[in-house]
Image (cartoon, grey):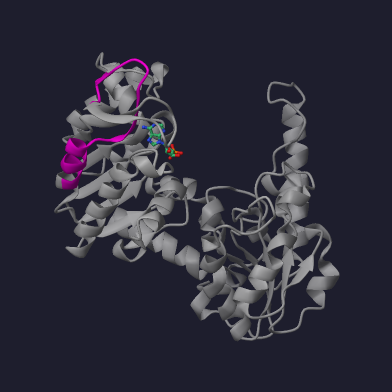
Amino acid sequence: MKINDYNFAGKKAIVRVDFNVPLDENGKITDDTRIRGAMPTLKKILAEGGSLIIMSHMGKPKGKVNPKLSLSQIVDAVSEKLGVKVQFAPDCAKAADQAAALKPGEALLLENLRYYPEEEGKPVGIDKEDPAYADAKKAMKASQKEFAKTLASYADCYVNDAFGTAHRAHASTAVIADYFDADNKMLGLLMEKEVSAVDNVLSNIKRPFVAIMGGSKVSSKIGIIENLLGKVDKLILCGGMTYTFMKAHGGEIGNSIVELDKLDVALGVEELAKKNGVELVLGTDSVIADKFANDANQKICPSNAIPEGWEGLDIGPETRKKFADAIKGAKTILWNGPAGVFEFDNFTAGSRAVGEAVAEATAEGAFSLVGGGDSIACVHKFGLEDKVSYISTGGGALLEAIEGKVLPGVAAVQG
Ligand code: AMP
């Protein structure tokens, strides 16, 4: 079912959203992007005369009640954005009466789903190596189904609008869909937008296609890097992973972040790029620092000749120019991961230069997709929100979708 074809009048909708927002030590929301992201779907359902049972996880309570991760802390913020006073169910698995009492136009927020280990469906307190693990896993899968069935029993229809967790087959993101027929389950508006943005990149590639992958490690991104080498015309690699490539060629990298056990992986990436005719673009100079801190002394130096006691924290001016030239003229752009330690204000120039080059190419007609928590933070930090085509809320989900993997949260609804 498509959400725009569904009539919510008089219906109770259980909606999985991603309200996993960052909180400060006083429980105040520091970035409400995710709450705002779900509003179009939630408001549409209420406006059509439906009622809402809203569910989400927050953080990693690992199957236990943890007041610091209680969604009760965000009820007021959700009420304010939604324009109705949202009720709260302090136990997500015992909310049947509150759900049943909801009238059209009313909304109920369930407590953190991950207070129950059934949400993630992983056995707790037992090691994977333990011979009893297989049985524990089977038992947990069975109780996960029961948990999903309980959640499903609150509502007439199910909407999944949580792209950030769409790559997880959890009770609320996938298993629950088994308890609704095809006419009563659907993706939310945010999910539809996310899925079509990825589709736009994958099935409608306008060339040149340039991907920019940054961040700290090559190991965590190797799957997507190898996959992209089968799709892109140019792949720009930056951030901390640069130094694993420099080291693989015998470069001096001082104290820079490096994965010494991944030198062969780096060489393999270079080989695959060559084989596929992809231009691999690596930095040549770095902004180096004498400590990992914003107030460190800094200087510019070749990325493969960093003195002892110094570490590369950003790309240098020559590299910024090289990357900007590589991005110029692109017609499809994917950007994931910062070019340097952009959290330190004195080491943002590289990530800013990448962001601005992406914005310029977008102004000249490229479709640019930016995703992953840190890249989104960069886009906000540099005020480029309106200058890129699409900012994805998904980190892991976005990368898995681009790798071509079927997302369980999407598959469960679409069948
Ligand atoms: P990831 O989680 O792998 O996407 O990496 C994001 C993190 O990489 C950010 O927190 C950056 O501060 C960090 N990062 C980027 N460049 C470097 C660098 N040269 N050295 C250390 N960390 C870096």
375 and 99: which is toward the camera: 375
Q: Can residue 144 be seen in this view?
A: no
Q: Is residue 56 visible?
A: yes
261 displayed left or right of 166: left
Q: Which residue is drawn at 59% across and 56% down?
A: 21
What span is colored magenta in the figure? Answer: 302-324
Q: Which residue is drawn at 51% across and 62% down?
A: 33
Q: Residue at x 39, y 51 (%)?
A: 378
Q: Where is residue 86 in the image (x, y as percent from the top left)?
A: 72, 74
Relative to 19, say whether 167 is above or below.
above
Residue 379 sits in which quadrant?
bottom left
77 displayed left or right of 375: right
272 and 66: which is toward the camera: 66
Q: Where is residue 325 in the image (x, y as percent from the top left)?
A: 14, 46
Q: Where is residue 151 in the image (x, y as percent from the top left)?
A: 74, 61
Instruction: Count how many numbered circles sit on residues in the image.
Output: 0
Q: Where is residue 310 in the image (x, y as percent from the top left)?
A: 35, 22
Relative to 296, say whether 357 is above or below.
below
320 and 191: which is toward the camera: 320
Q: Residue at x 68, y 83 (%)?
A: 105
Relative to 383, say whether 235 is above or below.
above
- Which quadrant contains ligand 1? top left
Residue 264 falls within the magenta-colored stretch? no
91 and 186: which is toward the camera: 91
